[in-house]
């Protein structure tokens, strides 16, 4: 067994206590006060000097003996607006809020990595910056941390996410395009109301909105290269006041997920034009508001090979694999737009018995936490021992 993994296993009682405390007291984005307090107290107990960032986040430096660059490690801390149904003894004590995406484990594992790295601070050829990010699920806490200088002096950045579909302790990475960019959008359709017996006197916003929904689907199927993944989802439609009255207005809420800046620009422009033209065909008007959501997670090829190398060193080749790209989204992409790095996955699948992310029954295998802590520490130590791109 690798010595780092052995030491991380000895930290299991502490990591379990951190994780279960955070799990039992989940906090939504921008409200992570108690989680922030726990993290800062744990880091202070290690002799470190954490500081608040982005209001409810935490930044903490572990300085080595030399004047080398900083490598950043990130964990997110916020929970989801979900009612837990696991029945665990440490289940959420907060009605309607749950850690169903593993951020409690992410935080505990990075605290474990901090304990491992503090023991080796005098051997670090540079520094390690720990980023405990707020509001990953909401409005993009990563960018707020960056705006407050969280990446100043950082040359490389790494992060991980638990993967319930993967075997416990298995590490997987995806080079290049890993997570999609997202653009939520709202379309307001304006028609003219009329009695259902006299439809010729009105302009039916429901018919126009329905046509917009159908036309938007053809953007992906007929205007994109079939090898360019993208998806447009209309998840909500509201219209009308009575069964026998033509609606004078309708609203659509949807989201675009895509890879690549050019495709993103193309599709956002076309969503607006298709909505406007389709509404006009039906005698209505449409106004579209497109929000610029998360950036895609584009893993640096060299850094991804480096992460894979670290995983093989720690676990052996049989416990390391490759992940396909996904059209889900992740706020880590904002960090990767600023400095090179890679985002990897850690299996918590409990032999295939773990429910998926964002499920009220999500119960990841805590036995993966020593692997996560040791991986964080090994990545940071190894990254400081080499110039970017060499030896990977």
Image (tube, grey):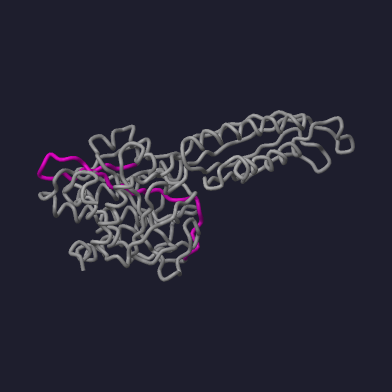
Q: Residue furthest right?
A: 197
Residue 206, quarter of the rendered image: top right
Q: Residue furthest bottom?
A: 351
Give the vertical position of 289 relative to 303 (above or below). Answer: above
Residue 143, quarter of the rendered image: top left
* Residue name at image x 36 percent, y 48 percent: 76
Q: Percent x, y for residue 350?
A: 40, 69
Numbered circles on residues, count: 0
Give the vertical position of 112 relative to 219 (above or below). Answer: below
Nearer to the camera, 253 or 90: 253
- Camera sees residue 99: no
Q: Quadrant of the N terminus?
A: bottom left
Nearer to the camera, 189 or 389: 389
Q: Percent x, y for residue 260?
A: 46, 39
Left or right of 125? Residue 199 is right
Residue 252, quarter of the rendered image: top right
Q: Percent x, y for residue 176?
A: 39, 47
* Residue name at image x 31 percent, y 45 percent: 341
Q: Which residues are magenta?
A: 57-86
- Camera sees residue 197: yes
Q: Is residue 67 magenta?
A: yes
Q: Is residue 117 magenta?
A: no
């Amino acid at each position: 067994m690798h010595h780092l993994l052995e030491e991380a296993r000895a930290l299991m009682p502490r990591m379990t206590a951190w994780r279960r405390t955070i799990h039992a007291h989940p906090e939504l984005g921008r409200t992570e006060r108690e989680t922030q307090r726990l993290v800062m107290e744990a880091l202070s107990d290690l002799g470190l000097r954490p500081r608040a960032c982005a209001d409810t986040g935490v930044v903490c430096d572990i300085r080595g003996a030399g004047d080398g660059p900083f490598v950043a490690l990130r964990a997110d801390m916020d929970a989801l607006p979900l009612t837990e149904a696991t029945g665990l003894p440490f289940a959420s004590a907060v009605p309607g809020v749950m850690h169903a995406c593993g951020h409690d484990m992410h935080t505990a594992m990075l605290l474990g990595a901090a304990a491992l790295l503090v023991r080796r601070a005098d051997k670090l050829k540079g520094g390690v910056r720990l980023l405990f990010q707020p509001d990953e699920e909401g409005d993009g806490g990563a960018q707020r941390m960056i705006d407050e200088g969280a990446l100043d002096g950082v040359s490389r950045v790494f992060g991980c996410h638990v993967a319930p579909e993967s075997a416990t302790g298995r590490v997987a990475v995806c080079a290049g395009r890993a997570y999609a960019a997202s653009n939520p959008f709202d379309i307001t359709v304006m028609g003219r109301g009329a009695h259902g017996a006299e439809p010729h006197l009105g302009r039916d916003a429901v018919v126009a909105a329905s046509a917009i929904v159908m036309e938007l689907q053809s953007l992906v199927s007929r205007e994109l290269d079939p090898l360019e993944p993208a998806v447009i989802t209309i998840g909500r439609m509201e219209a009308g006041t009575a069964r026998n009255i033509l609606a004078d207005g309708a609203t659509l809420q949807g989201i675009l997920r895509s890879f690549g800046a050019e495709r993103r620009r193309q599709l956002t422009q076309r969503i607006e034009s298709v909505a406007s033209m389709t509404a006009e065909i039906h005698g209505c008007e449409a106004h579209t508001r497109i929000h610029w959501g998360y950036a895609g997670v584009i893993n640096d090829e060299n850094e991804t090979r480096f992460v894979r190398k670290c995983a093989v060193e720690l676990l052996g080749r049989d416990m390391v694999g490759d992940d396909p790209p996904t059209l889900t989204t992740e706020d880590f992409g904002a960090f990767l737009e600023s400095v090179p790095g890679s985002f990897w996955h850690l299996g918590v699948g409990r032999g295939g018995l773990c429910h998926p992310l964002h499920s009220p029954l999500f119960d990841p295998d805590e036995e993966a936490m020593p692997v996560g802590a040791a991986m964080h520490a090994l990545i940071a130590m190894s990254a400081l021992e080499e110039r970017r791109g060499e030896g990977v």
